[in-house]
């Protein structure tokens, strides 16, 4: 009897060990590319192209960061990126929350049909609208300006509208009904009641918006042609084309552009998770 | 009577407010979606390099498309990439989610480590993978050499370039893993316990309780990943530009080259319309097939 129990216990211990080994090994594999990137970014050329690879740069060559960042005008690229990112963040927050309020709180016979339409636009491939829009912006003289990258942000983004609507639906309706009886307009309810209560959802949208625009590649690639307008994403691609063999510089610049994303992610992980999880419950 | 007037006025105001509140999206929808989609039909029937006026060519673009070898190559490559990355990615995301759902210590740290790569997906990380796949000094071939395997040329080999892109995409399964993890945590514990009392072993409980309960989530992940994978652009653009030969010419990349390298707007529009139809049909098929395996609770939960 006692032997039987200890056998069962042994089995469960082995199971736990295997579980931790698997999870740990997987986590190591997922982390190694980042470590490799940092390691490469701190090594001189003669230490980069060697076998077996040296993991710990000795001494670390911080010079790569300064050199890499100034070989191309990355400060300018950073400024351009920030202009677009901040504009789109504000634009998305305002426009998407307005639309989401309409869909979550106001009644209209066409509401459900329109919302279905909104959801279905999430499935339209980007490339279908890309060409006509380029021709339109070209006619308007907007090519090689930030306008094609900044103006659409003020007209809502289906995924964010969906996220915010879900959140608004979860807020108690009694709050705005009481306000309505007191004669509050919908604008007041939206601004004074719903928005202050929705800070977590707004944070989620802000983070996703930041991330999407920080990483956006195709938009800037199509619309920005002169180098002084470049964003970081296409600046990096240019760098990769011009200094392909300078792996140390390239990794240094890459680390710098990935770093803000990692920091924001670590600081605001719960908002990320909320957004991701909510996108999974479309049902 | 007066009350009724007041009510209709109230409703009227609400209807007006509804249109005002959704107007940003509605205007955007018409200007940035409906208009361009209709315009794309007309553009696809022309030959247009933007500089000179468009020439009406009827269905020529669509006819030429079926004679275009690169079109078929792009189609096959995209199918290969999509099937590979979606199926492997979904299975891997599910496995990691199941492992992380086993009451392990430090789960938040592990979760963060698995999640992080999907957040950083950008040019920087794509360039990093270029370096990882370096045949001589890259990380992957180094590890392969440790177990006595001489690694392939990866991005320079027509047979290995697509597998390389697929492997790279697996690194970004973090967000799907999070979705699965949330779904797993929503599986009612009573159901699993009841099955255990009835003598069902772990394997049986997994296949007959857990999987059916999370099947709507699996389905959603499959649909969204398929749409995403079908449109993959940045990775092959930065890493291979479709090469070697056309071995990594994915469909989105081919549309881009036609439109913005060769300025064949008409032909590119025709290509993108075919893509639209294919994505639509694919989604439709997935919805059809889903009826046979996706389990929705009969009592409406939400």
Image (tube, rainbow, N blue to C red):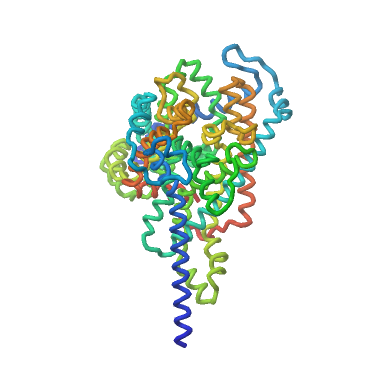
Measured from the top left, where is residue B176 in percent x and y?
Answer: 48, 50
Depth check: give the residue in front, B129 or B288: B129
Where B70 falls versus A26 (above or below)?
above
Residue at 47% x, 41% y: name it. Answer: A50
Q: In the image as oriented, which residue stretches furthest toward the top?
A: B52
Residue at 32% x, 39% y: name it. Answer: A190
Report whether B93 appears left or right of A182.
right
Where A283 falls versus B197 (above or below)?
above
Measured from the top left, where is residue B165 in percent x and y?
Answer: 56, 41
Tell me which corner region of the image, top left, top right, bottom left or bottom right, holds residue B51. top right
Depth check: give the residue in front, B5 or B73: B73
Where B209 falls versus A94 (above or below)?
below
Depth check: give the residue in front, B176 or B273: B176
Where B248 falls versus B41 (above or below)?
below
Report whether A224 appears left or right of B290.
left
Measured from the top left, where is residue B79 in percent x and y?
Answer: 64, 41
Tell me which corner region of the image, top left, top right, bottom left or bottom right, holds residue B164. top right
Measured from the top left, where is residue B190 in percent x and y?
Answer: 46, 69
């Amino acid at each position: 009897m006692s032997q039987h129990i200890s056998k069962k216990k042994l089995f469960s211990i082995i199971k736990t060990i295997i579980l931790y080994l698997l999870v740990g090994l997987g986590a190591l594999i997922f982390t190694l590319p980042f470590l490799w990137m940092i390691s490469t970014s701190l090594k001189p050329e003669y230490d980069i192209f060697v076998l077996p690879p040296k993991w710990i740069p000795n001494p670390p060559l911080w010079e790569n960061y300064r050199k890499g960042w100034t070989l191309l005008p990355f400060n300018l690229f950073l400024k351009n990126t920030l202009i677009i990112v901040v504009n789109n963040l504000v634009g998305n927050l305002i426009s998407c929350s307005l639309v989401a309020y309409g869909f979550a709180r106001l009644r209209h016979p066409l509401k459900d049909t329109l919302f279905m339409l909104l959801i279905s636009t999430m499935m339209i491939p980007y490339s279908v609208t890309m060409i006509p829009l380029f021709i339109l912006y070209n006619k308007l003289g907007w090519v090689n300006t930030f306008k094609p990258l900044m103006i659409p942000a003020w007209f809502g983004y289906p995924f964010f509208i969906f996220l915010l609507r879900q959140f608004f639906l979860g807020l108690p309706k009694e709050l705005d009904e009481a306000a309505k009886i007191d004669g509050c307009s919908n604008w007041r309810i939206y601004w004074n009641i719903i928005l202050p209560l929705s800070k977590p959802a707004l944070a989620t949208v802000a983070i996703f918006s930041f991330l999407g625009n920080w990483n956006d590649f195709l938009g800037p690639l199509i619309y920005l042609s002169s180098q002084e307008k470049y964003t970081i994403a296409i600046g990096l691609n240019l760098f990769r084309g011009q200094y392909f063999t300078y792996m140390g510089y390239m990794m240094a610049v890459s680390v710098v552009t990935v770093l803000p994303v990692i920091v924001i992610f670590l600081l605001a992980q719960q908002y990320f998770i909320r957004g991701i999880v909510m996108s999974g419950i479309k049902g | 009577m007066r009350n009724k007037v007041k009510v209709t006025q109230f409703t009227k105001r609400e209807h007006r407010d509804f249109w005002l509140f959704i107007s940003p999206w509605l205007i955007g929808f018409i200007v940035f979606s409906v208009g361009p989609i209709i315009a794309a039909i007309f553009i696809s029937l022309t030959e247009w390099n933007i500089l000179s006026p468009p020439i009406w060519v009827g269905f020529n673009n669509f006819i030429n498309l079926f004679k275009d070898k690169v079109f078929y190559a792009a189609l096959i490559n995209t199918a290969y990439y999509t099937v590979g990355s979606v199926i492997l990615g979904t299975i891997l995301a599910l496995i990691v989610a199941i492992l992380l759902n086993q009451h392990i210590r430090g789960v938040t740290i592990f979760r963060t480590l698995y999640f992080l790569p999907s957040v950083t997906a950008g040019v920087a990380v794509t360039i990093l993978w270029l370096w990882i796949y370096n045949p001589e000094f890259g990380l992957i071939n180094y590890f392969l050499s440790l177990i006595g395997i001489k690694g392939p040329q990866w991005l320079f080999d027509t047979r290995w370039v697509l597998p390389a892109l697929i492997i790279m995409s697996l690194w970004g399964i973090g967000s799907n893993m999070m979705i699965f993890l949330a779904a797993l945590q929503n599986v009612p514990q009573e159901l699993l316990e009841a099955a255990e009392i009835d003598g069902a072993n772990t394997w049986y409980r997994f296949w007959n309780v857990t999987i059916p309960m999370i099947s709507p989530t699996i389905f959603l992940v499959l649909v969204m990943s398929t749409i995403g994978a079908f449109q993959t652009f940045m990775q092959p653009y930065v890493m291979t530009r479709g090469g070697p030969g056309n071995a990594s010419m994915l469909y989105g990349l081919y549309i881009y080259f036609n439109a913005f390298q060769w300025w064949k707007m008409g032909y590119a529009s025709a290509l993108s319309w075919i893509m639209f139809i294919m994505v639509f049909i694919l989604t439709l098929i997935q919805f059809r097939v889903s009826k046979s395996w996706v389990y929705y609770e009969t009592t409406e939960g939400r």
